[in-house]
């Protein structure tokens, strides 16, 4: 934690209000951002964090309130370009890369080509500059690479390099410009928007270190996160709930995470035993029963299968781009976790299982059905395997359709001429997963990230699969919703669904899984049984 | 914070859609989506203005006349709607209707009767649609490029088959009857167009197939992962498009009574104009049958009324383009930004 | 091998060595046909208060619009209402406009350079509504050959056109005489129009009759190719056939495209183009000596008057004038006999008051 | 685990784009991107075949002529490239060139000299492009719809200004000279087209402006976040497109020496065909100047050679459409799937 010096805030938000139609997304939010400090912004899904960030970075103008920045009082930050020119930089969750460009160009569109608009670009010099910048910031990427080939874990680093590269430019060694006043800094305020969500936990530390070094140069940092573990590096904390600030804290002492969660959720929590995070009361364990009761019987994928006899999924010699002959089996009612580093195949496996990516070889048997060719999603679904992809944006739901239509998409035919059935089913999903706002007719794209994830979970669980593949199901989901999801997964397993669980956070594996399979270089290296399942064993085996 | 669905521009407010009626009727379905009827208002204003300014406008005969010639446009518009719904674009439809009309006239001129000519025209339309679909989905060519290439090739066939002549010999009387005959108050071709409008409305709004097409258009990848056979659905959309153009070509051959090698390409853009106008109406932001029909009527009534008033000939395109722009500008943001292709 | 004699008539019996008097032939080729007014002389009292609708093939084409102007002028003179509907260049729009004309309440519908077989729905509606249908520029009534109608087709009651076959022969003779019997002619035709086909039946045999000349097989294009491929294709033909020194083009717009393409290719001096219609632009080419050397023009205003005249007779149930063309005059124009005033060619005598007198008597 | 960029298709192989040469020369830049030259191979084969089969092919005159008639197509293709690069589509260019030609002839006919006529045509082209840009970016209308509406309105103006006649009076000799005159071995219009090709190549490949356009086309959202003024860039792309069409219209007026109110719409799809062909060449998967030029030459040489050989007229479109399809089918996957609009 950095030493706190008395200084004028880099940016002060004064009673900012923002409405979308009737919805008050931000209600009189005030906030001071100090130079050199990392300010964590917490809040459950839909609490207004993204909206606030957009106001700070000029995407939206507030409906009321003012922003004090660089000793000027402003009604808003103008446009993103204007805000950037004033020294406000944002690293968005989705790395700002354009697949069709090279890394050099991707950096240059943010940082300039070093040429007049119509002047010739000195490509060689530009590329060397970019390479130097990447090297200084410890980002293992080549400037000549095409953006589409940059690994996900490196994208966050690249994104940071793009945004605060000015601080690391040619003439100054990292940190050399540190100046607590921050007066002459090209970057005054850095906003990192849930960036670590996309990085495997094992690689987040490097990223947080980079952030700290940026703060140490005198930059004020706003960090939006759902991972409470990352609060360690934060100096200040603000919690939003339903558009209002409900808690703020500057420096130590720090309240325990469970209390922060309670602030976010805004209702009393039943704290579970041991290190298990709190569970929300209310939503009972019967949510799946009501879901499956509501759903048309003939559709439930596993209803025809005998759950008691033998493994429900058997994978033999599965090969893909990363996997070199994986074999495992899992039984009904099990929650099997998968761990591994980037490149180990742990990212690829769910995509192979869902039929999203082609298999090079292998065989998968699900409930007695043998699939040999890279099953298309339809074939996998028909066999009883449902997979929730991690990439909610491009693979999860259809933004332009209603929640209603998204939920029934995998089994449209079942609801033909049964509008009341459809209504009942969709409402039961909304209730079971506490989707907010609870309106089936809302466009999917209009929901906040966490609520989208709940809808998708409902969409797939509804099918009553015999095997459920979850790929990072808590991606961008607030702690309250996270619990809803864990509960649902545990419920499903209890009711005989075999869950294959992938997560970027090893804690989740430890908490929820019956056993964890560890992959390395495309092969299975070990199986950690429940009895030995600890954070240490998972990390140890993954890294070995 | 998740940025997934947040665009840099303020999102349109979520719109409340259908109600949860327990027994859907077609009629209720028609009313269900009802929110955006700005184009209908313009249409009504036009009708009132023309009715007041010329006696010739609101007569049975004029109404019949307005309707009968719009049947080709209507079917062409339905034809382009399917690729648009699934997120593709079909530049071949203009060339295709010309090709099919010449083909039909060619077969007729070589002694084939209606029983051969009509199915041949419609089915070959479907086959060309299928080829478009296969080129885009199996070979992986962008639909603009594939359909443009196919269209240009078809133009060659059209010119070759016609020998550069207007073909009018032996057109079966069934065909001309279908094109121009009357059954009751309306022309047979108008009944056909109405029939297709109802069937397509039902298919698009009420069946899993229709909803799947919209889903594929909304996100091909999500639909794929949801188990929809997206490639097949898109190929099917192209094929239906070709079949619609086939039906349109039968009406065109019947209404003209002959096939002209230059016919066709001029019908491409009007079909798109009507489909785009359709997006402003009924289900704003989605290509839909009712909106398209209203769009066609709007353009047709405008053309007819202005002709009856005797405006100079060059006013017509200014009116048509102006209506399209104005309708879209005053429409909701979804309609303005509707996805076109890709 | 090409002879580039100026078209300036020398008048001295220049026989070109074959015994034919080419100079006289040239003079004859460029005479107006018929030489004097041979239009109707029997009066036909115009009924009052009629509405006549002119449907143009496409209102951006001069040859489509001027007859409609003639109709409007004639109609105004007898107190009829006239209205022009733009056929838009496609059968679909032409059909639509015929239907609009029916809705408008037209008593007479005059098709101008529209293929009747392509607008059957419109014609059926017109017939059902009791409107009289006449046409111009189709070449389907006397003095042109009357084609056999396909079964069930509705055709106009009468067509007013120049004698296309004779027009073609005059053009052929102009070419033969201008080349002194040595022409090597590329012939471009279009099978889409009866009138052009009739013209072809005149020019092709007449050219063949000149044993010292050469002429190509007819090369057919379609109207849609005029703006795109006809020009470059012509250039390529002329380049690969360097002996060709005359080019017959079926009507003026394609000829204009060919003139421009040949000029752009620097081949403007290699050939002389002749065509038919009398569009202002083509007459300008002739005047400026730009590739086109002659144009057979016919009087499109006269066509409008004659269409109104025949319509009056049909409405009165009087016998039609025969030949149906009512002596619509044409003339092969070259540099020597171009009218001095700009614009399209009209017959050099006052036929308008003669027509009007018949209608008012 | 999250992979933001995954697509259903395997990713294209990484391609190294700009090279790291320290002193960029235009020449080196031309070679730098060089990977996909399949279309060039087809072009060379065609040239060899035609040269062997007809003497008239490889003559100076013929080469000159092939080039001069392609200058209008070339500028039209450049015109449609800019909207395509930024992810938009412009359906108005065909109507626009017709409108500008008639406008130029109209001004000339009313006594204006080249000094008024030429700037007026080019600038008004830019203004219409600007309007297209504003409608799409400021009013938020999908570019297909906006440009279609604008195009149809322009058609009305064209017809009105022409009065339904071919305008040919008083065309300044400077204009006809620019269109058809020669300077050295090549026509002036060919030099102009070459000049624009070089300038546009430089702007697109070597300047921040050009790279920003490609970035906006790659992802408007990311470009916006990068601080690029995406709306302005897109508006600029439409404006440049209009200016290019303006230049094309001057050449067209000069080459034909007159303005025909029906001229224009037929040029739309050929321009797109050439731009699509361009995507298969040089920088596969991107619209680019060199590829487009090769595409234009390919279609032109094919047309020229075939007509010198005297093939029937209907073979031409079959050849053109076939070349487009084949070139795209054999090209890399990026080229097949290139983004068109949206
Ligand atoms: N453009 C918009 N139009 C309408 N409503 C919006 C818009 N953007 C956000 N909202 C609504 O405003 C509220 C706050 O949304 P915001 O995206 O700021 O939440 P968040 O805290 O970032 O949530 P999450 O953690 O799920 O990303 C939500 O109810 C959301 O649905
Ligand atoms: N899967 C389906 N199978 C059969 N019919 C369906 C299906 N989905 C919807 N429908 C029918 O379509 C009509 C409209 O559907 P829905 O209620 O989903 O539309 P909506 O909610 O208005 O759509 P949106 O909100 O996207 O505009 C309903 O009458 C319903 O019967
Ligand atoms: Mg709904
Ligand atoms: Mg958010």
Image (cartoon, coloured by chain):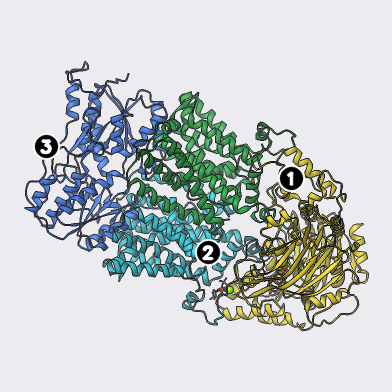
Chain colours: A yellow, B cyan, C blue, D green
Q: Between marks 3 and 2, how big is the CA–CA gap?
A: 65 Å
Residue A17 rendering spot, x and y as whole percentages: 69, 71
The reply, left or right, for residue D145 in relation to residue B74 is: right
Classify mark 1: helix, strand or loop: helix
Q: Pointer 2: what residue?
A: B335
In depth, the one of B155 and A372 nearer the eye is B155
Q: Residue A499: which numbered mark, if any?
A: none
Residue C194 rendering spot, x and y as whole percentages: 26, 44
Q: Pointer 1: what residue?
A: A104
Q: Between marks 1 and 3, how big is the CA–CA gap?
A: 83 Å
Q: Quadrant of the N terminus of chain D?
A: bottom right
Using the image, determine if residue A242 lies above or below residue D40.
below
Q: Residue at x 93, y 65 (%)?
A: A536
Q: Does residue C170 appear anywhere in the picture?
A: yes
Classify mark 3: helix, strand or loop: loop
The reply, left or right, for residue A327 in relation to residue C84 is: right
Q: Residue at x 56, y 70 (%)?
A: B208
Q: Quadrant of the C terminus of chain D?
A: bottom right
Q: Pointer 3: what residue?
A: C36
Q: Residue at x 80, y 80 (%)?
A: A280
Q: Between marks 2 and 1, how big is the CA–CA gap?
A: 37 Å
Q: Mark 1 falls within which chain?
A: A
Using the image, determine if residue D134 lies above or below residue C220.
below
């Amino acid at each position: 934690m950095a030493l706190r010096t008395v200084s004028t805030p880099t940016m002060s938000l004064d009673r900012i209000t923002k409405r979308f139609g009737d919805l008050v997304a931000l209600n009189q939010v005030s906030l001071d951002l100090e130079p050199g400090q990392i300010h964590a912004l917490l809040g459950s899904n839909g609490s207004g964090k993204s909206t606030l960030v957009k106001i700070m970075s000029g995407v939206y103008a507030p409906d009321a309130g003012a922003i004090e920045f660089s000793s000027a009082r402003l009604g808003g930050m103008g446009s993103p370009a204007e805000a950037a020119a004033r020294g406000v930089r944002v690293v968005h969750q989705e790395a700002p890369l354009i697949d069709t460009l090279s890394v050099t160009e991707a950096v240059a569109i943010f940082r300039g080509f070093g040429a007049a608009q119509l002047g010739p670009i000195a490509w060689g010099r530009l590329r060397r500059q970019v390479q130097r910048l990447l090297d200084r910031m410890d980002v293992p990427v080549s400037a000549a690479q095409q953006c589409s080939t940059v690994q996900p874990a490196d994208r966050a680093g690249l994104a940071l390099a793009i945004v605060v590269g000015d601080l690391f430019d040619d003439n100054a060694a990292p940190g050399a410009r540190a100046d607590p006043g921050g007066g002459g800094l090209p970057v005054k305020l850095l906003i990192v928007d849930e960036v670590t969500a996309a990085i495997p936990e094992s690689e987040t530390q490097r990223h947080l270190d980079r952030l700290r070094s940026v703060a140490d140069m005198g930059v004020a940092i706003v960090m939006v996160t759902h991972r409470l573990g990352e609060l360690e590096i934060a100096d200040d904390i603000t919690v939003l709930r339903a558009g209002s600030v409900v808690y703020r804290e500057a420096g130590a002492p720090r309240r325990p995470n469970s209390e922060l969660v309670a602030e976010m959720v805004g209702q009393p929590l039943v704290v579970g035993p041991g290190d298990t995070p709190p569970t929300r009361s209310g939503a009972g364990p019967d949510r799946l029963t009501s879901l499956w009761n509501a759903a048309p019987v003939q559709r439930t994928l596993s209803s025809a299968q005998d759950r008691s006899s033998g493994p429900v999924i058997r994978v033999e010699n599965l090969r893909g781009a990363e996997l070199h002959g994986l074999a495992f089996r899992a039984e009904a009612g099990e929650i099997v976790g998968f761990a591994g580093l980037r490149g180990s195949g742990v990212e690829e496996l769910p995509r192979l299982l869902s039929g999203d990516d082609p298999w090079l070889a292998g065989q998968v048997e699900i409930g007695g059905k043998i699939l040999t060719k890279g099953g298309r999603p339809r074939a996998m679904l028909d066999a009883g395997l449902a997979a929730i992809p991690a990439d909610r944006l491009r693979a999860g739901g259809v933004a332009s359709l209603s929640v209603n239509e998204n939920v029934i998409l995998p089994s449209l035919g079942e609801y033909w001429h049964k509008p009341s059935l459809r209504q009942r089913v969709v409402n039961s999903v909304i209730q079971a997963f506490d989707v907010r706002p609870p309106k089936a007719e809302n466009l999917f794209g209009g929901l906040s990230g966490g609520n989208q994830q709940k809808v998708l979970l409902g969409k797939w669980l509804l099918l009553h699969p015999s095997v459920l593949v979850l790929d990072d199901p808590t991606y961008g989901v607030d702690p309250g919703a996270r619990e809803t999801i864990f509960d649902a997964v545990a419920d499903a397993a209890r009711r005989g669904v075999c869950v294959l669980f992938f997560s970027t956070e090893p804690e989740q594996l430890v908490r929820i899984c019956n056993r964890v399979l560890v992959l390395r270089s495309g092969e299975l290296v070990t199986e950690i049984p429940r009895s030995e399942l600890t954070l240490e064993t998972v990390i140890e085996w993954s890294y070995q | 914070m998740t940025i997934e669905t947040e665009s840099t521009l303020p999102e349109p407010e979520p719109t409340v859609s259908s109600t949860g009626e327990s027994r859907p009727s077609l009629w209720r379905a028609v009313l269900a989506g009802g929110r955006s009827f700005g184009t209908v208002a313009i249409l009504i204003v036009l009708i009132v203005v023309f009715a007041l300014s010329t006696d010739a406008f609101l007569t049975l005969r004029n109404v019949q006349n307005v309707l009968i010639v719009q049947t080709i446009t209507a079917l062409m518009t339905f034809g382009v709607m399917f690729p648009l719904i699934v997120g593709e674009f079909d530049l071949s439809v203009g060339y295709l209707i010309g090709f099919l009309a010449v083909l039909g006239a060619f077969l007729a001129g070589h002694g084939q009767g209606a029983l051969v000519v009509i199915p041949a025209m419609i089915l070959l339309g479907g086959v060309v649609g299928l080829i478009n679909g296969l080129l885009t989905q199996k070979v992986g060519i962008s639909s603009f490029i594939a359909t443009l290439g196919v269209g240009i090739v078809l133009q060659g066939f059209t010119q070759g088959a016609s020998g550069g002549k207007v073909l009018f010999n032996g057109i079966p009387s069934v065909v001309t009857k279908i094109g121009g005959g009357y059954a009751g108050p309306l022309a047979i071709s108008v009944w056909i167009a109405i029939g297709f409008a109802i069937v397509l409305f039902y298919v698009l709004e009420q069946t899993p197939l229709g909803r799947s097409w919209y889903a594929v258009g909304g996100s091909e990848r999500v639909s794929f992962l949801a188990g929809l056979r997206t490639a097949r659905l898109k190929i099917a959309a192209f094929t239906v498009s070709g079949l619609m153009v086939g039906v349109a070509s039968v009406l065109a051959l019947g209404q003209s009574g002959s096939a002209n090698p230059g016919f066709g390409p001029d019908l491409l853009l009007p079909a798109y104009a009507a489909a785009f106008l359709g997006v402003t109406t009924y289900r704003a932001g989605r290509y839909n049958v009712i909106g398209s029909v209203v769009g066609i009527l709007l353009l047709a009534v405008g053309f007819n009324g202005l002709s009856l008033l005797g405006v100079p000939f060059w006013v017509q395109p200014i009116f048509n383009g102006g209506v399209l722009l104005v309708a879209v500008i005053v429409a909701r943001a979804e309609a303005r930004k509707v996805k076109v292709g890709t | 091998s090409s002879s580039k004699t100026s078209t300036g008539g020398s008048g001295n019996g220049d026989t070109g060595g074959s015994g034919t008097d080419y100079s006289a032939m040239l003079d004859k080729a460029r005479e107006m046909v018929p030489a004097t007014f041979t239009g109707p002389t029997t009066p036909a009292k115009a009924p009052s208060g009629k509405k006549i609708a002119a449907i143009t093939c496409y209102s951006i084409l001069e040859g489509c619009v001027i007859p409609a102007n003639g109709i409007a002028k004639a109609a105004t003179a007898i107190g009829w209402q006239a209205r022009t509907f733009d056929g838009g260049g496609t059968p679909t729009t032409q059909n639509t406009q015929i239907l609009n004309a029916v809705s408008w309440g037209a008593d007479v519908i005059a098709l101008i350079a529209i293929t009747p077989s392509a607008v059957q729905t419109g014609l059926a509606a017109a017939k059902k509504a009791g409107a009289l249908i006449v046409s111009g520029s189709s070449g389907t009534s006397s003095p042109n050959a009357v084609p056999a109608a396909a079964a069930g087709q509705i055709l106009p009651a009468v067509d007013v056109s120049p004698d296309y076959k004779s027009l073609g022969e005059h053009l052929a003779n102009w070419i033969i005489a201008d080349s002194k019997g040595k022409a090597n002619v590329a012939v471009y035709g279009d099978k889409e129009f009866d009138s052009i086909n009739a013209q072809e039946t005149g020019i092709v045999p007449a050219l063949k009759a000149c044993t010292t000349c050469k002429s190509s097989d007819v090369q057919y294009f379609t109207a849609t190719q005029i703006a795109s491929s006809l020009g470059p294709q012509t250039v390529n033909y002329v380049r690969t056939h360097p002996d060709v020194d005359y080019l017959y083009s079926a009507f003026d717009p394609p000829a204009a495209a060919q003139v421009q393409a040949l000029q752009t290719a620097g081949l403007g001096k290699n050939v002389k183009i002749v065509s038919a219609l009398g569009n202002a632009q083509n007459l300008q080419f002739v005047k400026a000596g730009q590739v086109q050397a002659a144009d057979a023009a016919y009087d499109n205003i006269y066509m409008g008057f004659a269409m109104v005249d025949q319509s009056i007779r049909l409405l009165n149930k009087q016998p039609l004038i025969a030949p149906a063309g009512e002596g619509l005059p044409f003339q092969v124009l070259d540099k020597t006999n171009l009218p001095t005033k700009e614009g399209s060619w009209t017959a050099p005598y006052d036929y308008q008051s003669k027509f009007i007198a018949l209608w008012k008597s």
